[in-house]
């Protein structure tokens, strides 16, 4: 999908479809039986004229994701005019605009339209550069289709494919900043789709070895250093917690290290991104029930997020050193698999009593975090589909954020708000630490009946030690359970945009 900018008058553009946003400018809340006050957010009077009748009819209210398609709109050169409801004007933001751009792509794709123009009106309150970025991101994210292995895949032969999106911003005083916003948005969203692509693959086609190969190929394309290691290195590093999980599988594990080392970076900051890459989680000997187990192919979403984030970082070139450490393995039951009651010695030297082999993510991350520290990382962020408990706590809407210091949290929150992703902080107070105690070893890997997401985070904290650290539990948010107007059911690519924004925030 090509994206470009234009400053032309929307009504004068020849296109298959012109897209404009309609906001509800009524002030009162619904309870007061307020009538909607739909307002067409376009700076071109001819476009507003063309919508007069349909607005007067009451058919268009401006409520979120309402779509109205007009053919041969009077006075416009466009063949069609798509009105996209954006909800209440006072709640409108770049995050809504991003979703609307995705909605436009997904709506028009189904109508065999190949290209369209999205006109951004200055009146919606979103500054032009931010708007351009949000529109490119939303359109690119909306374009992703997970139906990879359908033999009649429609967008394969371009019958249902958006070739080009033109974003119109009238009267912008700084065209150069718009062009750079377009480029930034494109890089970030394409990286997010790269992540989603990795997550979407089934586990037979996305083994640890294949994941390492994909990371290597991407690194070569964007100019990152990439090392990938197998069983020997994992054993040589004494990664007993990681190997404990990997030992049960016939597929060899992979330790993937991606390095971004720009000139002019601050000397005292080295960010470490650690990802959980369980390419399939059966639960191991503590095997999971069959119902829904197929979804455990997405248990490598944290790893894919970090690999995708490194892609964006390599292309955006912030001046800060970043290393990604990805631990990739299957979690399988077998005659070689670890068993409940086994004790593993982690790379840091701490001993772990395995209570439940299905609590495997924290084991591989324990060694991943330790290794990132050994590589010299001064600040750590991990992302993992770690617990079902975070889904109980936050549902499918918010990802869980855990932070060892308020400063790290503030920095991450700022990035998260800029990225427009939903996340919520959960606590890791010392009082929870009681739960980790083992009779035989330094700690257990599972055991809490309640507060499971917090327990997992407390466990990880033992391995982040005194290095400032943020943990993202994306178990409930890495996979969209339903189709949404703006995004397909399947891998979401959650956390990538926040991570890239977070890294940019440290740029010297
Ligand atoms: N990969 C799962 C967590 C998960 C659950 C991811 C749902 C995505 C959707 C993780 O390895 C796991 O099995 N966690 C267990 C931990 C328990 C055994 C302590 C869980 O949450 O049930
Ligand atoms: Mn598990
Ligand atoms: Zn898992």
Image (cartoon, rainbow, N blue to C red):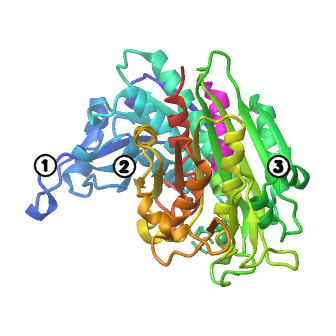
Give 205 or 66, whichever is nearer the viewer: 205
Residue at image mark 1: 27
Span highlighted in magenta in the image: 305-318
Write the residue at 31% across / 36% down: 47
- Disc 2 crowd, CA 10 A, few/some/many (<14, 14-19, 20+): many
Where is the N terminus found, in terms of image quarters? Answer: top right
Residue at the extreme left of the image, as rendered = 32
Above or below for 104 versus 436: above
Please tell me in which quadrant of the rendered image residue 173 appears. top left
Q: Residue at x 47, y 42 (%)?
A: 17
Quickly name the residue at label 2: 84
As displayed, is residue 268 above or below residue 373? above
Q: Is residue 85 left or right of residue 255?
A: left
Pinpoint residue 330: horizontal percent, then vertical percent: 78, 65
Disc 3: which residue? 237
Q: From the viewer's perspective, is 118 left or right of 480?
A: left
Q: Main secondary structure of the magenta part?
A: helix
State which quarter of the image contains the C terminus.
top right
Q: Residue 312, relative to residue 262: is it above or below?
A: below
In this rendering, position of residue 397 left or right of residue 294: left
Q: CA distance from mark 2 to mark 3?
A: 55 Å
């Amino acid at each position: 999908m090509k994206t470009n900018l234009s400053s032309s008058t929307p009504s004068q553009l020849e296109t298959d479809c012109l897209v404009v946003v309609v906001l509800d400018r009524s002030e009162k809340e619904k309870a007061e039986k307020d009538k909607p006050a739909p307002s067409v957010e376009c700076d071109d009077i001819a476009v507003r004229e063309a919508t007069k009748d349909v607005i007067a009819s009451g058919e268009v209210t401006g409520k979120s994701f309402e779509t109205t398609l007009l053919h041969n709109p009077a006075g416009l050169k466009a063949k069609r005019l798509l009105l996209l409801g954006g909800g209440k004007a006072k709640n409108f933001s770049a995050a809504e605009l991003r979703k609307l751009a995705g909605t436009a792509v997904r709506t028009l794709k189904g109508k065999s339209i190949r290209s369209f123009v999205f006109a951004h009106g200055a009146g919606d309150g979103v500054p032009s550069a931010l708007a351009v970025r949000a529109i490119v991101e939303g359109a690119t994210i909306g374009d992703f289709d997970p139906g990879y292995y359908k033999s009649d895949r429609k967008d394969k032969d371009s019958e249902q494919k958006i070739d080009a999106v033109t974003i119109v911003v009238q009267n912008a005083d700084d065209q150069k900043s718009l062009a750079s916003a377009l480029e930034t948005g494109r890089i970030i969203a394409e990286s997010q789709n790269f992540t989603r692509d990795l997550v979407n693959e089934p586990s037979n086609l996305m083994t640890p070895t294949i994941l390492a190969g994909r990371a290597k190929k991407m690194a070569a394309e964007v100019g990152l250093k990439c090392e990938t290691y197998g069983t020997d290195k994992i054993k040589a590093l004494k990664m007993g917690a990681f190997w404990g999980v990997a030992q049960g599988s016939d597929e060899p594990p992979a330790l993937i290290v991606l390095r971004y080392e720009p000139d002019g970076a601050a000397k005292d900051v080295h960010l470490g991104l650690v990802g959980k890459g369980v390419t399939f989680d059966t639960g191991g000997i503590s095997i999971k029930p069959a119902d829904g187990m197929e979804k455990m192919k997405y248990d490598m979403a944290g790893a894919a997020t970090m690999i995708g984030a490194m892609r964006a970082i390599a292309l955006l070139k912030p001046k800060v050193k970043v290393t990604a450490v990805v631990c990739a393995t299957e979690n399988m039951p077998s005659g070689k698999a670890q068993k409940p009651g086994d004790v593993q010695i982690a790379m840091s030297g701490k001993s772990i009593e395995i209570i439940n082999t299905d609590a495997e993510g924290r084991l591989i991350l324990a060694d991943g975090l330790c290794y990132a520290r050994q590589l010299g990382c001064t600040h750590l962020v991990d992302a993992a589909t770690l617990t079902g408990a975070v889904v109980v706590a936050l549902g499918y809407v918010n990802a869980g954020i855990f932070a060892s210091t308020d400063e790290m949290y503030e920095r991450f929150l700022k990035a998260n708000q800029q990225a427009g992703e939903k996340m919520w902080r959960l606590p890791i107070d010392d009082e929870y630490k009681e739960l980790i105690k083992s009779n035989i070893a330094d700690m257990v890997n599972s055991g809490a009946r309640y507060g499971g997401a917090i327990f997992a985070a407390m466990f990880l904290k033992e391995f982040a030690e005194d290095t400032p650290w943020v943990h993202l539990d994306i178990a409930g948010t890495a996979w969209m359970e339903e189709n949404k107007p703006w995004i397909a059911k399947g891998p979401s690519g959650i956390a990538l945009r926040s991570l890239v924004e977070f890294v940019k925030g440290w740029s010297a």
